[in-house]
Image (cartoon, helix red, strand yellow):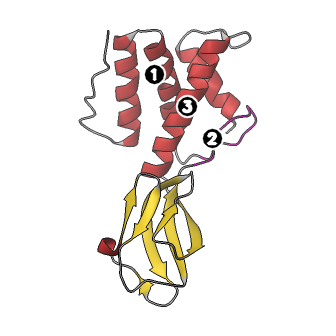
Amino acid sequence: MKFKDLIDMALDRVDEDKEAPDQLALDVIKDGINQGYSLYSVLLDPKTKVFSYQYEKRKKLPDDFYDFVNVSHSTLGDLSDVDYERQADLICIHNRYVKNGTIDVLYIAYPDVLKNEQDDVVLKGNFAHALSAYGAYAYQLHRRKYSAAQMLLQEFYSYLGITGGEQEVESE
């Protein structure tokens, strides 16, 4: 599936003209689809990457970092959860025996941001409808149509199997 297909699905859901949509609306929908794709990817279809570096007590994590899977040291092997932690965009090593060597961080990564309409979107099952719902949710939220936005958000949650997603959309 292409990014354009998801955009068109979301535009259909909010009655925007697919041939000549409002540019601001299009940008909001694209951003919403990307946010939904990130949530889908880390929660339902996580992909891992490895980040390796020469030991430093604090090291900046990659921009696509979501969560740790495993952290290991070239000499000591796997580190326990108490040996390291995330502080903002840094990994901080607390194990006093780690002084030199290579640290390998296996982590769940956010997907690449969809930018071009011809970008491939890799989805399992019927999750295209979920992403179009999230794109439409972002659009309705932008237009201050809070009831419609809430319904679309609940639809997205139901596709992802999230129950109790009773987050209220704030209205001003």
Q: Earlier in the sequence, mark 2 or mark 1?
A: 2
Q: Which residue is mark 1?
A: 137
Judged by depth in the image, the label closer to the viewer, 2 or 1, is 2
Judged by depth in the image, the label closer to the viewer, 3 or 2, is 2
| Residue at image point 46% right, 79% down | 72
Q: Quadrant of residue 114?
A: top right
Left or right placement of residue 80 versus residue 130 in this view:
left
Q: Which residue is mark 3?
A: 33
Q: Are marks 2 and 1 in contact (CB under 8 Å)?
A: no
| Residue at image point 67% right, 13% down | 23
Q: Amino acid at mark 2?
A: Val
Q: Amino acid at mark 3?
A: Ile
| Residue at image point 41% right, 32% down | 156
As measured in the structure, the alpha-carbon distance from the residue carrying label 1 to the one carrying label 3 is 9 Å
Q: Which residue is mark 2?
A: 113
| Residue at image point 72% right, 39% down | 119
- x, y percent for residue 152: 41, 22
Q: Magenta stretch? A: 111-122
Q: Secondary structure at mark 3?
A: helix
